[in-house]
Amino acid sequence: MEAVLGILRGMWLTTGPTVANFERRFAEWQGVAHAVAVSSGTAALACATFASGFGPGDEVITTPLTFVATANSIAYRGATPVLADIDPRTLCISPDAIRARLTERTRGIIVVHFAGQPADMDPIMQLAAERNLIVIEDACHAPGATYRGRKVGTFGQLACYSFHPVKPITTGEGGMLVTDDAELSRLASLYRNHGISRDGRQRAEAGAWEYDMTELGQNYRLTDLHCAIGIEQLDRLTDSLARRRVVAARYDDAFRALEYLELPERPSDSESGLHLYPILLRLDKLRADRNQIFRALYAENIGVNVHYIPIHYHSWYQRQFGFRIGDFPVTEAIYQRLISLPLFSAMTDDDVNDVITAVSRVLRYYGN
Ligand SMILES: *Cc1c(COP(=O)(O)O)cnc(C)c1O
């Protein structure tokens, strides 16, 4: 609150020094050369697909099990989203499924580190190198996650984060694009500000009024007010992740003993960002489907959710690209069983116990 008041009392409400500070701090934290602050995770993805140069006729591969914004960022460019099914163990896109979807039109891959679990980046980056593809990491679930000892967000040419309130750190609304590539960073910055060569602050500092619009961009700027919150939040990320690890470990212990559900794998060569805690119901051992279990947990006052309705279930994607239910059987079988349990750093031990008790009671009641 003090940080925000400091901005309100100062000179710049937007595109001032605090945006640049947050970008510098974020780039340092990520260990990359460039960070571009934008108004949402969706805006970060849109800047990434713009900077990648995707256009009509290009195919870009992504996962069906994600929020619509991931696939939308491909469609915004007039490019074609191609879906590749998931690995049922980690719920992330399967490298083998990606390989099966490659064509001579494939230009890129957007991976999602689902629930915070890093996608299997080594084979994916190898495939991308063989075929000269751009890889964008949708790391909205995964700030701080590591794969084989290295932070996610540093594998692809570009990575995107969201600072929506449900995400691990928040600015209210906001997002960040990170990259080591100066040209990709320049293009993303351009797209963020209408495709105009100089922003207001640069013009003020140069004492000049001229500018040129070289690309068709957007207004995806983030304000100094938001970035002041972001700087404070970034300092809390480590503690927040540590608390979520404790909560997840308690869940793991309790639920491994319960025969009515399975847990996705978290392979030992990676550390999840633990944004979500998905469980997979054993429908063969239950007299109820996912929706009934969901409602029963809701009635127990547990804030459950389902992440996500697969991309190809949405009517726009069916109409626009001809996707049908049946196209991605692994994702579909998982989706029928999927529920996300509450997982956030402010959970008390009592909250955790309440969730464990409610899940155990509901599943035992419906167990056969
Ligand atoms: C939240 C989220 C987005 C979009 O971020 P916004 O800040 O809400 O626009 C994109 N991809 C994934 C995987 C997300 O979880």
Image (cartoon, rainbow, N blue to C red):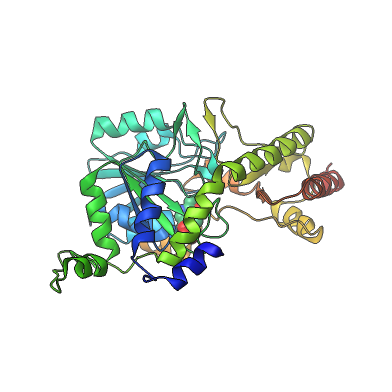
| Residue 274 as seen in the image, left or right of residue 44 | right
Residue 188 image-quadrant placement: bottom left
**Could you tell me how many numbered marks the image carries?**
0
Task: Out of 297 and 309, give the one closest to the viewer.
Answer: 297
The answer to whether residue 134 of the structure is visible from this angle is yes
Establish if 121 lies above or below 110.
above
Left or right, 275 with reference to 76: right
Q: Which residue is drawn at 38% across and 28% down?
A: 123
The answer to which of 18 and 162 lies nearer the viewer is 18
Q: Do we see residue 163 in this rendering?
A: no
Q: In this view, does 217 lie above or below 166?
A: below
Q: Quadrant of the N terminus?
A: bottom right
Q: Position of residue 182 (x, y in %)?
A: 22, 45
Q: In which quarter of the image is the C terminus?
A: top right
What residue is shown at x 85% (from left), y 43% (from top)? 364
Give residue 141's position: percent from left, percent from top: 51, 47
Q: Which of 36 and 63 is in front in this view?
A: 36
Measured as percent of width and height from the top left, residue 86 is found at 49, 40
Whether residue 296 sits left or right of residue 233 in the image: it is right
Q: Where is residue 16 in the image (x, y as percent from the top left)?
A: 34, 65
Decide if residue 139 is on the left or right side of residue 244: left
